[in-house]
Image (spheres, rainbow, N blue to C red):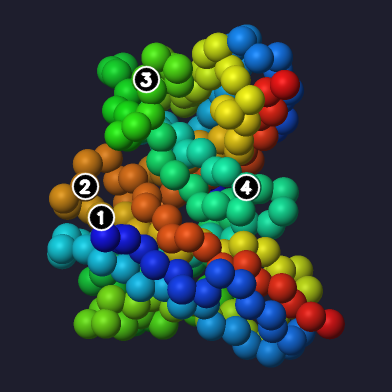
Amino acid sequence: AQKITQTQPGMFVQEKEAVTLDCTYDTSDPSYGLFWYKQPSSGEMIFLIYQGSYDQQNATEGRYSLNFQKARKSANLVISASQLGDSAMYFCAMRELIKAAGNKLTFGGGTRVLVKP
Amino acid sequence: GAVVSQHPSRVICKSGTSVKIECRSLDFQATTMFWYRQFPKQSLMLMATSNEGSKATYEQGVEKDKFLINHASLTLSTLTVTSAHPEDSSFYICSAGGRDTEAFFGQGTRLTVV
């Protein structure tokens, strides 16, 4: 079974509007962390935001916020006020902190976002 | 924030030759580093976990004799693609992080085998 699922392979968003990228995960580990990365065409992986499984509040970093619904096992990324520079691939990833050895990250399939002027 | 540096960013090599890719943690010590591979329009797939001072742990289906990993110091891990073939052409990227909440990536290496 997929551990990280991103159901939207690609999406368009109008500049200055908000966009929500879906991410659902599957784990039996009680302690885990969820990451979102942005990957522009250059290939670099840019860290956006982190949510720990025990965090009481949803994580926010500037225009990025994470809608963490633990019972539903979802960790959707919300980008507010989209900019042309937000056009990129976005990956959701999970780190299982107890059961998995070595703190490795498991990635979803990614969502390509194209911001239209 | 912590920085992970990867070199080279691009490399073209002839089929049958070997290529070494370096991954350095610049301002922190990394006992563990991770090597990923990414084919075009696909996600990152973990190849192996590099452990300082001991053998790397390879994911299922990854040939350890083809993808040699050495983690000789707390700041450097190397991935050597031995006897490269065109099907090894891909984007290789390393990551490291000092804490559970961190995972920093190198810039990636685009390998083309001709």
Looking at the rendered image, the quarter that the N terminus of chain A falls into is: bottom left
Which of the two marks, 3 or 2, is nearer to us in this view? 3
**In the image, residue B99 above or below residue A39:** above
Residue A46 visible somewhere in the drawing: yes
Which amino acid type is shown beneath numbered disc 4? Pro
Please state the chain letter of the residue tagged with numbered disc 4 in the rendered image. Answer: B
Q: Amino acid at mark 2?
A: Ala
- Same subunit, tags 3 and 2: no
The structure residue drawn at horizontal position 41% and vertical position 41%, both measured from the top left corner, is B46
Return the chain for callout 1: A
Residue type for callout 3 = Lys
Chain label for disc 2: A
Q: Nearer the viewer, mark 1 or mark 4?
A: 4
Q: Residue at x 52, y 63 (%)?
A: A110
Per the rendering, the mark at residue B64 is 3
Q: Few, some or many C-alpha atoms within 10 Å of disc 4 (few <14, some 14-19, many ≥20)? A: few
